Amino acid sequence: MPTRRDSAQTRLVFRALRAGGQTWRYGYDIASETGLAPGTLYPILARLTDRGLLESQWEQDPPTGRPRRHLYRLSTEGAVHAANLAAEPVTPPKTVGYRTRLADGQS
């Protein structure tokens, strides 16, 4: 059975979480570091949590006037996986937009 390869975006998430050690991090913080849009980041965080590679919890005692944030950190298995990925180079995600297609002569 083939092993699942992590996308470049997922590798960026692992890199950011690994750099933080066992610190709990919230989504906006991870998005700011990785440059990933929420529509890309949050499904990755949910998938990694479902796979047991991340732990997640709701923030305890948020400041008055701000809702609780969902926090994430690497699980033990996720830390091992992130360490294995750290040895491999991270390739920036490829995006092909309208301007790229026009530059290539495609419409």
Image: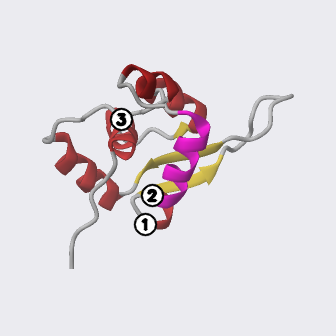
What residue is shown at x 81% (from left), y 31% (from top)? Answer: 66
What residue is shown at x 38% (from left), y 25% (from top)? Answer: 105
Q: Which residues are magenta?
A: 37-48
Q: Where 29 sits versus 84, above or below?
A: above
Q: Secondary structure at mark 2?
A: helix
Q: Residue type at mark 2: give it.
A: Leu
Of mark 3 and mark 2, the one earlier in the sequence is: 2
Query: How far apart are the two marked residues, 1 and 3, measured between alpha carbons?
Result: 22 Å
Of mark 1 and mark 3, the one earlier in the sequence is: 1
Mark 2 = which residue?
48
Using the image, tell me which numbered label, if any, was put on residue 93.
Answer: 3
Q: Residue type at mark 1: give it.
A: Arg
Are the residues at dot 2 and dot 1 in contact (C-beta closer than 8 Å)?
yes
Q: Residues within 10 Å of mark 3 (few under 14, many from 20)?
A: few
Q: Secondary structure at mark 1?
A: loop
Residue 83: x percent and y percent?
A: 21, 47
Our reading of the magenta stretch's main secondary structure is helix
Using the image, tell me which numbered label, if any, was put on residue 51.
Answer: 1
